[in-house]
Amino acid sequence: MFPIEPKHKPALGESIFIFFLTIGLISYFLIGLGTRPHIPILIAIMLIVIYGLSRKISFKDLEEGMIAGAKSGMGAIFLFLLIGILISSWMISGTIPVLISTGFSLIGGTWFYAIAFAVTAIIGISLGSSLTTSATIGVAFIGMGTAMDASMAITAGAIVSGAFFGDKMSPLSDTTNLASTIVEVDLFEHIRHLSLTTIPAFIISFLLFAVLSPDASVGVSNLDKYMAGLEETGLIYWTSWIPLIILILATIFKVPAFISLAVSSMTATILASITSGLAWTEIWVIWFDGYTGSTGFEPVNSLLTKGGINSMLFTISLVILALGFGGLLFVTGIVPSILSAFQEKLQKVRAIILSTAATAIGVNVLIGEQYLSIMLTGETFKGIYQKAGLSNKALSRTLEDAGTVINPLVPWSVCGVFIAEVLGVPVLTYLPFAFFCLLSPIITILFGGKTIIKSQRTSTKSEQRS
């Protein structure tokens, strides 16, 4: 059931105490002291190592647990490096500038947050990746919001909400495929069942973003200066659309993410060498350090100064620490103890749904990894749902409602760290405005039980008639 074999079996009370101790410690450093998340995670690792040694677990086993945890994120780490290159190459090829410029000409100031949410959701479904969506169209919307003097917190909340709606509902999404596979549900049946809670969350979120959107006149006076600044870069050509088109086509044909990002980045780089006049030596520097804007309008320079491998090193180092911390929580038996405690005590539908959601959220908070949140919760509750007579699609839906969408709301999680870095908005700043991510688990807890019971009654009546 668990990816790392526990070397100790702590009592449930002991596990819960350590759980709240570590979360309290991390929260105090992040919120109370305002430190970088690396610091409390590293201190928490030291505390768990001390705890493990006090429980007669050898340091070698603890070290192997950390390494195994960190190893589980290597696929994401390679993608992060490529996304850093993708952003810088899309800058010099004009892809991100042309997206921003087009957005300025189409959107203006009317319903800005709602449109950012809806467009990001559509792109998210098309790409099937919340991180790629945030790093591409999300960066463009941040630029538009900056030009319009819009709230960066609400803009980022709209981007994150749309990106994770798309990630959740896309048949191309790895988390959507994982959730359906882990509990053996047909992919498209899983997506149809997700709509029961996802569509209401989408509608409510859209209305909230529409109400919060600035008046059409707010910030529009700045748009001409931004448009002129973008034109001054000399990066925008008709060829600037090609890297985006390649990425979309690669997604449609289900090309692996690593290859899709690599091909799009290389295409953008080659186009940039032709259109921008940059020497190859300059391009490789930009690949590592990112692009630096050099127009006569400083806000545009700040907007375009992004990307590069170097910009991802903060994220990568934190991901390694967070997943290593997660590995320690497994090898010491803390997480397995808490998850196993649920298996024998749940019978009522409402309690099962609530416990499933709470477990998925808890794994996200404690470990910071959405894949483990889906896998561990799915494996833990599969037998419970079968005993209670609940369908597997009810479980797969709850995994997505409370597992996938919560990860970007955790400051030390894989998604949270990445999105905060590429958008330039801290997790705790955009968290109150990521309405879709906040509403999804609430709706599944409030109405999931009723929906499942209603579905069971309908199925029973159909069986009786037949």
Image (cartoon, rainbow, N blue to C red):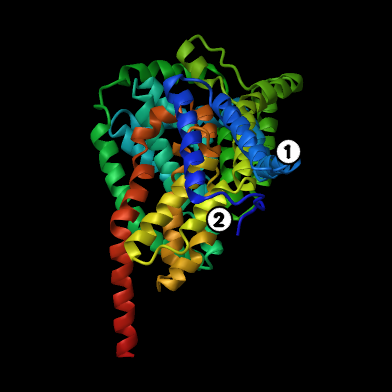
**How many numbered discs, if any?**
2
Question: In terms of secondary structure, where does tag 2 sit?
Answer: helix
Residue drawn where x is 69% and y is 20% of the image: 278
Tell me if I can see residue 425 in this picture: no
Q: State the mark number for residue 375.
A: 2
Marking on residue 59: 1
Q: Is residue 138 above or below residue 353?
A: above
Decide if residue 287 is in sight here.
Answer: yes
Q: Nearer the viewer, residue 239 or 58?
A: 58
- The CA span between labels 2 and 1 is 27 Å
The foreground one among 444 and 331 is 331
Q: Are marks 2 and 1 in contact (CB under 8 Å)?
A: no
As shown in the figure, which amino acid type bears the numbered disc 1?
Answer: Phe
Q: Which mark is residue 103?
A: none
Question: Hey, which residue is sitting farthest bottom in the picture?
Answer: 466
Q: Position of residue 466 (x, y in %)?
A: 34, 90
Residue 40 falls in image quadrant? top right
In the visual, does 339 lie left or right of 390?
right
Secondary structure beneath disc 1?
Answer: helix
Residue 367, compared with residue 337, is above or below; it is: above
Q: Residues within 10 Å of mark 1 (few under 14, many from 20)?
A: few
Q: Position of residue 177 (x, y in %)?
A: 54, 58
Q: Earlier in the sequence, mark 2 or mark 1?
A: 1
Q: Position of residue 244 (x, y in %)?
A: 56, 40
Tell me the residue at 46%/46% (across/down): 362
Is the residue marked by circle 2 packed among few (<14), some (14-19), or many (20+) residues within 10 Å?
Answer: many
Type of amino acid under label 2: Met
